[in-house]
Image: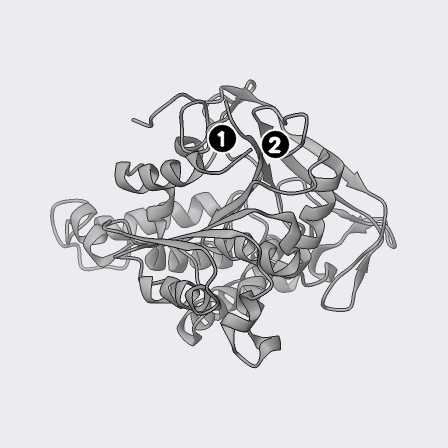
């Protein structure tokens, strides 16, 4: 049971920006929209705002429930609310669906103003740096000159860190959770296999929804999100029907779980968004302009940092988080580090864990508003 209480009923909002946005790929969006939600109250100085950055398949619905869909609970509801680590009695918390997303922000499913038809696969490639540029416009729209903190897990943690590099004067604290300074070759490989599952689906080639490809991409992703110990505890080698049936239908419980997750994901996520989100992950490498020197890349940061990793996260292992910590220490920048014992693998940052949530809460209690 999460500490504190939920923010309750929430409502999604939409912000439109008519000033063109130049993307790193060279394309320009003439205008764009971002879906977002807010929780708590922005103080008169605009100094108590926290930006929550989402991971690959995330969105703006971070906490609470919708009146028309009470079962649709925000993806990080256990950490946001009165008395929770992101305490909405102190902080004004903002969740946003990134540019290129499929939850209302401008993306492949949106109308291309040049053609009057959905962008689809013509939507330009977006990067983490583009997301920060778009999020900065949302901050301006909300009257937030500087974030008290940016926070996120996985790809969200990369965004939280990129804020400190790209717009260092606009963030005082960064909570970088279950993240890495860049993807390893193995992680890029996983993303490429997932993309090929979509791109090689015959339905994608003819403009139809590639449900088979999305299903396989999600199944692969879930294997990397869970730890071996968690899969052993949750499924083991248990047979769904109690006996071997010598066929290729579902026999093991783990197969049933993966197919269920794949089917569910294929029913709602946009394939072109998935392709772009994984590419944004692949491209992110803030040290590249500095000859691979991460300390040099982080040198402009004015923020204080909390970096958190999880022992069984093999997709973004603790060693990757320590790369960030070591770079900050080299620069004599202010950083705290926590390595949490957890059996949940990469998904640990989403789980209720008293130790983990206590560390986040303790850090944020010392953040001035």
Q: Is residue 146 above or below residue 279?
A: above
Nearest to N terminus: mark 2 or mark 1: 2
Q: Image quadrant for the N terminus?
A: top left
- Residue 94 seen in the figure: yes
In contact (CB < 8 Å): disc 2 and disc 1: yes
Q: Mark 1 packing: few (<14 Cα in 10 Å), some, or many (20+)?
A: many
Q: Which mark is residue 63?
A: 1
Badge 1 element: loop
Q: Which mark is residue 13?
A: none
Q: Position of residue 151 (x, y in %)?
A: 50, 46
Q: Is residue 284 above or below residue 303?
A: below
Q: Residue at x 59, y 77 (%)?
A: 290
- Residue 56 seen in the figure: no
Picture quadrant of residue 46:
top right
Q: Which mark is residue 37?
A: 2
Q: Position of residue 257 (x, y in %)?
A: 30, 47
Q: Nearer the viewer, residue 63 or 72?
A: 63
Q: Nearer the viewer, residue 183 or 86?
A: 86
In the displayed image of the protein, which residue is found farthest to the left? Answer: 243
Q: Residue at x 72, y 58 (%)?
A: 123
Q: Image quadrant for the C terminus?
A: top right
Q: Position of residue 43 (x, y in %)?
A: 63, 26
Q: Nearer the viewer, residue 344 or 243?
A: 344
Taking the image as shown, residue 348 lies to the left or right of residue 268, namely left
| Display coloring | one colour
Label 2, label 1: how far apart the Cα atoms are: 9 Å
Q: Residue at x 28, y 39 (%)?
A: 353
């Amino acid at each position: 049971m999460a500490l504190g209480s939920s923010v309750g009923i929430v409502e999604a909002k939409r912000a439109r920006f008519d000033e063109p946005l130049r993307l790193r790929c060279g394309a320009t969006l003439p205008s764009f929209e971002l879906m977002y939600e807010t929780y708590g109250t922005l103080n008169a100085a605009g100094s108590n705002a926290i930006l929550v950055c989402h991971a690959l398949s995330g969105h703006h619905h971070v906490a609470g429930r919708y009146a028309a869909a009470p079962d649709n609970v925000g993806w990080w509801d256990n950490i946001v609310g009165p008395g929770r680590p992101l305490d909405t009695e102190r902080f004004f918390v903002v969740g946003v669906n990134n540019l290129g997303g499929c939850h209302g922000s401008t993306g492949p499913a949106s109308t291309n103003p040049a053609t009057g038809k959905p962008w689809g696969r013509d939507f330009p490639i977006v990067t983490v740096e583009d997301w920060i540029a778009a999020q900065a416009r949302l901050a301006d729209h909300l009257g937030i000159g500087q974030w008290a903190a940016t926070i996120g897990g996985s790809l969200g943690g990369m965004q939280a860190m990129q804020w400190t590099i790209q717009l260092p004067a606009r963030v005082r604290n960064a909570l970088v959770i279950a993240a890495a300074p860049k993807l390893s070759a193995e992680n890029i490989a996983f993303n490429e296999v997932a993309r090929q599952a979509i791109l090689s689906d015959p339905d994608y080639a003819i403009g139809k929804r590639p449900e088979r490809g999305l299903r396989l991409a999600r199944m692969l992703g879930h294997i990397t999100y869970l730890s071996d110990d968690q899969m052993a505890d949750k499924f083991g080698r248990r047979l769904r029907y109690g006996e071997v049936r010598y066929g290729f239908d579902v026999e093991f419980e783990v197969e049933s779980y993966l197919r269920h997750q794949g089917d569910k994901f294929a029913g709602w996520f946009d394939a072109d968004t998935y392709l772009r989100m994984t590419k944004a992950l692949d491209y992110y490498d803030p040290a590249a302009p500095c000859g691979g020197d991460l300390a040099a890349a982080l040198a402009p940061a004015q923020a204080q940092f909390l970096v958190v990793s999880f022992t069984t996260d093999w997709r973004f292992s603790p060693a990757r988080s320590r790369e960030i910590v070591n770079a900050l220490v080299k620069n004599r920048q202010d950083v705290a580090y926590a390595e949490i014992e957890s059996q949940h693998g990469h998904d640990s940052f989403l789980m209720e864990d008293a130790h983990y949530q206590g560390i986040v809460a303790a850090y944020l209690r010392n953040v001035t508003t």
